[in-house]
Image: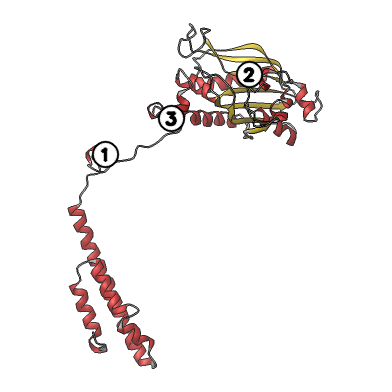
């Protein structure tokens, strides 16, 4: 096409009239307005004001015609698609042929219980803290009052990474770190994954999740511990589940007690899940041993406090009526989709 300023605009309009698709309109735009078009080259060579004004007016007229034609063509294309590619969005997904809706996932039951536990204690004014999964024996055993001969320090019970390095067997070390860095009042929940050389059975697994509470202040008594645990149990399991407390021994609490919840399978009559006792142990609890205050450099008579710990998977078992802990780690969608 030869450059003729008198007929250039007419040729552009005529080409646009023949275009029937968005691609064809775009092609006309490139031909008459693109960098290599005659109009663009002429604008680069303008040397006088009148020629520049005339060519710019031509450019604006062609651009307006292109925009108008493109809007009309796109509207026609949309109307044609709506007529030819009609889809009833009210139909069930299985009737839509090759179209398949993705099944929406859900949180793992352990994660659901963990978030519920966090919400309960945040409502009580506690702080949620996390700790290191790889710990030293100083914080995992020494700080908690475990003597050298204690069975839990044996490689048969604990996973050692070195002479003085272990995979934490409980989340208590995070509490010791907190006590070393912060003066009371302290109200925290340490929560996370822990590791033990446990034999797998209905309620034990080598890897599980645990949450442990620590409250240290002036004037805290055993009544505060029992009231806190009763409130937490009621929030987690409902008012219909029976709760009992038994005296027990733990190296880092004195006096100590063990909270139990009535078995969800047998209702207290006795079955393999509860080892025919009618009760399932939830964890340990008690008043903080004065030894821990001395370990972090506090006066043993200055403060009192309580601590407790429970397994998240075991809590989920009791809450949802799951007879064994294995399904939590099997990644079986038939199990996970129930939650």
Quarter of the image with the C terminus is: top left
User: Of circles 1 and 3, which is in front?
Assistant: 3
Image-based side of 293 in relation to 270, left or right = right
Q: Which of marks 3 and 2 is nearer the N terminus?
A: 2
Query: From what the image shows, is residue 275 above or below residue 214?
Result: above
Q: Distance between the residues labelled 3 and 2?
A: 29 Å
> Would you say the residues marked 1 and 3 are in contact, meaning their CB atoms lie under 8 Å apart?
no
In what element is the residue under mark 2? strand
Percent position of residue 283, x then y: 60, 19
Percent position of residue 318, x then y: 49, 19
Q: How crowded is mark 1: few (under 14 residues within 10 Å), some or many (20 or more)?
A: few
Percent position of residue 115, x then y: 52, 32
Q: Nearer the viewer, residue 69 or 2?
A: 2
> Would you say the residues marked 1 and 2 are in contact, meaning their CB atoms lie under 8 Å apart?
no
Q: How far apart are marks 1 and 2 (CA)?
A: 50 Å
What residue would you read off at disc 2? 284
Q: How far apart are marks 1 and 3 (CA)?
A: 26 Å
What residue would you read off at disc 1? 93
Query: From what the image shows, is residue 201 above or below residue 124?
Result: above
What residue would you read off at disc 3? 331
Q: Earlier in the sequence, mark 1 or mark 2?
A: 1
Q: Which of marks 1 and 3 is nearer the N terminus?
A: 1
In what element is the residue under mark 3? loop
Residue 101 quadrant:
top left
- State the residue at coordinates (54%, 25%): 312
> Would you say the residues marked 3 and 2 are in contact, meaning their CB atoms lie under 8 Å apart?
no
Q: Residues within 10 Å of mark 3 (few under 14, many from 20)?
A: few
Percent position of residue 221, x then y: 71, 19
Q: What is the number of callouts on the image?
A: 3
- State the residue at coordinates (40%, 26%): 335
Quarter of the image with the N terminus is: bottom left
The outermost residue toward the bottom is 48
């Amino acid at each position: 096409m030869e450059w003729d300023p008198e007929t250039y605009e007419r040729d552009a309009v005529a080409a646009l009239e023949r275009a029937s698709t968005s691609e064809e309109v775009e092609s006309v735009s490139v031909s008459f307005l693109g960098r290599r078009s005659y109009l663009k080259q002429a604008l680069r060579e303008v040397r006088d004001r009148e020629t520049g004004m005339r060519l710019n007016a031509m450019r604006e007229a062609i651009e307006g015609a292109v925009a108008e034609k493109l809007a009309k063509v796109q509207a026609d294309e949309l109307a044609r698609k709506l007529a030819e590619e009609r889809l009833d969005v009210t139909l069930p997904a299985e009737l839509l042929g090759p179209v398949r809706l993705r099944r929406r996932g859900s949180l793992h039951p352990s994660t659901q219980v963990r978030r519920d536990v966090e919400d309960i204690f945040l409502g009580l004014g506690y702080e949620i803290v996390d700790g290191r999964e790889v710990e030293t024996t100083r914080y995992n055993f020494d700080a908690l009052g475990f003597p050298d001969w204690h069975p839990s320090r044996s490689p048969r019970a604990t996973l050692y990474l070195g002479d003085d390095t272990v995979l934490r067997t409980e989340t208590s070390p995070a509490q010791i770190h907190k006590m070393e860095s912060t003066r009371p009042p302290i109200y925290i929940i340490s929560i996370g994954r822990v590791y033990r050389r446990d034999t797998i059975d209905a309620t034990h697994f080598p890897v599980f999740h645990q949450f442990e509470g620590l409250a240290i202040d002036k004037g805290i008594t055993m009544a505060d511990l029992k009231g806190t645990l009763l409130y937490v149990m009621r929030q987690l399991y409902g008012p219909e589940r029976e709760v009992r407390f038994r005296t027990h021994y733990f190296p880092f609490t004195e006096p100590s007690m063990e909270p139990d919840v009535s078995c969800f399978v047998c209702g207290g009559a006795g079955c393999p899940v509860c080892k025919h006792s009618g009760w399932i142990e939830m964890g340990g609890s008690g008043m903080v041993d004065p030894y821990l205050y001395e370990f972090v450099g506090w006066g043993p008579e200055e403060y009192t406090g309580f601590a407790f710990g429970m397994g998240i998977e075991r809590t989920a078992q009791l809450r949802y009526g799951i007879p064994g802990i294995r399904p939590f780690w099997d990644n079986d969608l038939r199990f996970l989709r129930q939650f």
